[in-house]
Image (tube, rainbow, N blue to C red):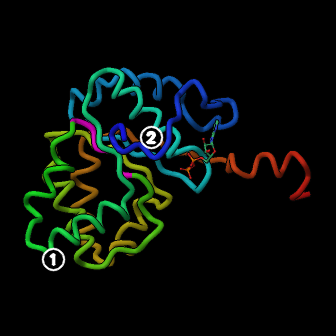
Amino acid sequence: KLAHLPYRKTLEEFDFAFQPSIDERLIRELATMTFVTRHENVLFLGPPGVGKSHLAVALAVEAISQGISVYFVSLSHLIEDLRKAYMENRLDKRIRIYIRPKLLVIDEIGYLPFDSLAANLFFQVVSARYERGSILLTSNKSFGEWGELMGDPILATAILDRLLHHSHIVNIRGNSYRLREKMRTGAYG
Ligand code: ADP
């Protein structure tokens, strides 16, 4: 299980022509991994199916090929893992898994609401990595919706403050690639 990637996708397999709102040059620049050396974050935002996870995996693959340590995790897995560690009084040890790698990829923020422990655990990870190691995350929620998502607008602001301070934001507006075939075959017509 290389860096816990859920599957393997590359930038070469990504059809930039299908998603014109993505600046291909920025993605190619991110693939040089300079952002990791600078401890900057990358945020892919947009509706489901526009390629956020694909790009996150592809950049993780690129990082690994350059010898950069990477850990890939979905937000729900991260929270459940740290929640369990917290309950068992071994949070300090377990959280290191998410602090040590040079690049931490957190996929799918926004599909599940946070309770207050979840929001606190997420804050701890973001704080511990702040200006020390990069986070690449994907979310279907805009920043304005994070307060409600986390059930705590002040904590959400503190998290966003740290995430966005040194960051590259990729806003993707467009159609779901998953529905492409269906639209082409007229299933939606
Ligand atoms: P999101 O994370 O935004 O919900 P995904 O990255 O999971 O979307 O994309 C859904 C599926 O469509 C995946 O199989 C992905 O590889 C594919 N896909 C999405 N956008 C593109 C694209 N522009 N070119 C090639 N495949 C794409």
Q: Residue at x 21, y 54 (%)?
A: 126
Is 111 magenta? The answer is no
Q: Residue at x 21, y 52 (%)?
A: 162
- Does the residue tagged 2 have its C-beta within 8 Å of any atom of ligand 1? yes
Q: Is residue 70 left or right of residue 111?
A: left
Quadrant in the rendering for residue 121: bottom left
- Secondary structure of the residue carrying tag 2 is helix
Quarter of the displayed picture in which ligand 1 can be seen: top right
Frontmost residue, 153 versus 88: 88
Label 2 Cα crowd, 10 Å radius (few <14 / some 14-19 / many 20+): many
Q: Is residue 188 left or right of residue 22?
A: right
Is 103 magenta? The answer is yes
Among numbered discs 1 and 2, the one appearing first in the sequence: 2
Q: Position of residue 80 (x, y in %)?
A: 30, 68
Which residue is denoted by mark 1 in the rendering? Answer: 87
What residue occupies the far front of the structure in this picture? 1
Q: Which mark is residue 56?
A: 2
Q: Position of residue 53 (x, y in %)?
A: 50, 46
Report the magenta stretch's main SS: strand
Q: Is residue 77 left or right of residue 58?
A: left
Q: Position of residue 17 (x, y in %)?
A: 68, 30
Examine the rendered structure and indicate whether residue 184 appears above or below residue 32: below
Quadrant in the rendering for residue 84: bottom left
Badge 1 amino acid: Met
Badge 2 amino acid: Ala
In three-dimensional space, the C-alpha distance between marks 1 and 2, rounded to whole angstroms, equals 30 Å
